[in-house]
């Protein structure tokens, strides 16, 4: 069977691993390896319209709300025209879009597959806050249009898939859940089972947004462990909370660029030496960092929110707190330190990575889905 020719459409440059935390880059590479011949269509140029500038100013000063021009029909049409121009250069069997924005207003006979980690509705009031009513209406209209046009819609989590069905009335048969994989170049060797009763206990926090990712909660967990007489250290990667720089219970490592071999090895070393990844995010559409932790046989402590429950299974490969209370995390750590329970968590974390949360697994699943469309 001839490999399909795929137009991979993104708003940004998907060949740059720095965009969208690297997921767009790894999706493109996955498609090339498992599905067909890929042509990158992106980045797309944006455009500022007078109406949008007026809306922004009006809402900023009248009701202190945010207007989102990228969700307007004018910008959607502008993106669609760019995609159409680029599609004219060759013949394609499939359009594969990362997200709905670049294809919502696209008029084409070519089948469209959308792959996303959230719907617009699921993000409003959660990930995207203080949005004005006009943007909510325009955003929902754009999302509904894209989902209706798509031949197949792939979501990284059940949370996002449920929103498409409940908020936009999409037929469940049109939807498939295909989890994102770990954004790493090479699978690390299976980690030797270690005893988590050693001290200090190393908790690893990885994230650029200290507040949204729940960094202050992770810090409270370390302080509570110390108050109980446990030696514990919080390792922070991706951000630099200045008020903690002199705290002896914290190690701030800053940002590691995965494109740099040395920095990539340093990050992998932190994963391999940690006892738990802690991700008490207040809002999280998915959590690729969890997949990366699983690749290193590292159990994960997380908040039961957004797409995280697709990855973390409470008591199996980590812990989910419904309330995001630091006491919950401390109690779980205490019960699972230095015994067979911890080893089972490690084994389950690695198995989850090998079976579901890697890009090869996603590629094989997407290949089967696309073949069923032909």
Image (cartoon, rainbow, N blue to C red):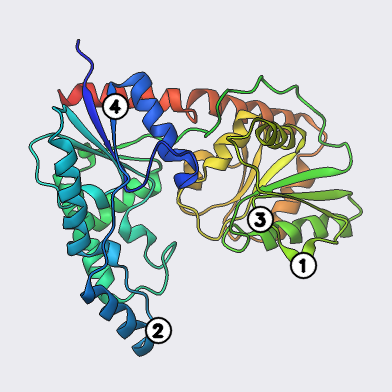
Q: Which mark is residue 243?
A: 1
Q: Which residue is mark 2?
A: 64
Real-space Cα separation, disc 4 to disc 3, in angstroms: 34 Å
* Secondary structure of residue under mark 1: helix
Badge nearest the viewer, 2 or 4: 4
CB atoms at circles 2 and 1 under 8 Å apart? no
Image x and y of residue 40, in percent: 30, 34
Image x and y of residue 75, in percent: 22, 60
- In the rendered structure, the answer to whether residue 321 lies left or right of residue 18 reads right
Mark positioned earlier in the residue sequence (4 or 3): 4
Real-space Cα separation, disc 1 to disc 3, in angstroms: 12 Å
Hey, which quadrant is residue 292 in on the image? top right
State the residue at coordinates (26%, 52%). 101
Q: Which residue is mark 3?
A: 239
Q: Nearer the viewer, residue 1 or 353?
A: 1
CB atoms at circles 4 and 3 under 8 Å apart? no
Q: Which residue is mark 4?
A: 38
Quarter holding the N terminus is top left
- In the rendered structure, the answer to whether residue 234 lies left or right of residue 307 reads right
């Amino acid at each position: 069977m001839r490999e399909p020719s795929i137009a991979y459409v993104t708003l940004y440059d998907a060949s740059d691993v720095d965009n969208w935390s690297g997921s767009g880059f790894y999706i493109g590479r996955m498609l090339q390896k498992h599905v067909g011949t890929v042509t990158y269509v992106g980045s797309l140029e944006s455009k500022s319209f007078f109406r949008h500038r007026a809306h922004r100013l009006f809402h900023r000063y009248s009701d202190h709300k945010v207007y989102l021009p990228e969700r307007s029909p004018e910008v959607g049409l502008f993106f669609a025209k760019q995609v159409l121009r680029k599609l004219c250069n060759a013949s394609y069997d499939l359009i594969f879009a990362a997200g709905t924005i670049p294809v919502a207003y696209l008029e084409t006979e070519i089948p469209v597959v959308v792959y996303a980690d959230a719907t617009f509705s699921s993000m409003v009031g959660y990930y995207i806050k203080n949005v004005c009513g006009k943007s909510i209406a325009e955003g929902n209209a754009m999302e509904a249009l894209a989902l209706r046009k798509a031949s197949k819609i792939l979501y990284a989590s059940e949370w996002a898939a449920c929103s498409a069905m409940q908020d936009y009335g999409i037929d469940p048969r049109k939807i498939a859940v295909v989890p994102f994989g770990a954004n790493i170049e090479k699978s690390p060797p299976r980690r030797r089972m270690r005893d988590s009763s050693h001290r200090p206990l190393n908790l690893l926090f990885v994230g650029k947004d200290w507040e949204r990712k729940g960094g202050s909660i992770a810090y409270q967990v370390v302080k509570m462990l110390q108050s109980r007489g446990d030696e514990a250290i919080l390792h922070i990667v991706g951000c630099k909370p200045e008020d903690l720089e002199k705290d002896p219970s914290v190690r701030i490592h800053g940002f590691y660029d995965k494109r740099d071999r040395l920095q990539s090895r340093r990050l992998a070393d932190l994963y391999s030496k940690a006892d738990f990844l802690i991700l008490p995010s207040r809002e999280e559409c998915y959590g690729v960092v969890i997949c990366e932790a699983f690749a290193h046989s590292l159990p994960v402590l997380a908040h039961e929110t957004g797409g995280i429950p697709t990855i973390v299974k409470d008591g199996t490969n980590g812990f989910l707190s419904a309330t995001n209370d630091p006491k919950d995390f401390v109690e779980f750590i205490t019960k699972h330190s230095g015994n067979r329970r911890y080893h089972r968590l490690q084994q389950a974390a690695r198995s989850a990575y090998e079976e579901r949360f890697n890009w090869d697994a996603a590629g094989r699943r997407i290949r089967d889905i696309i073949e069923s469309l032909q």
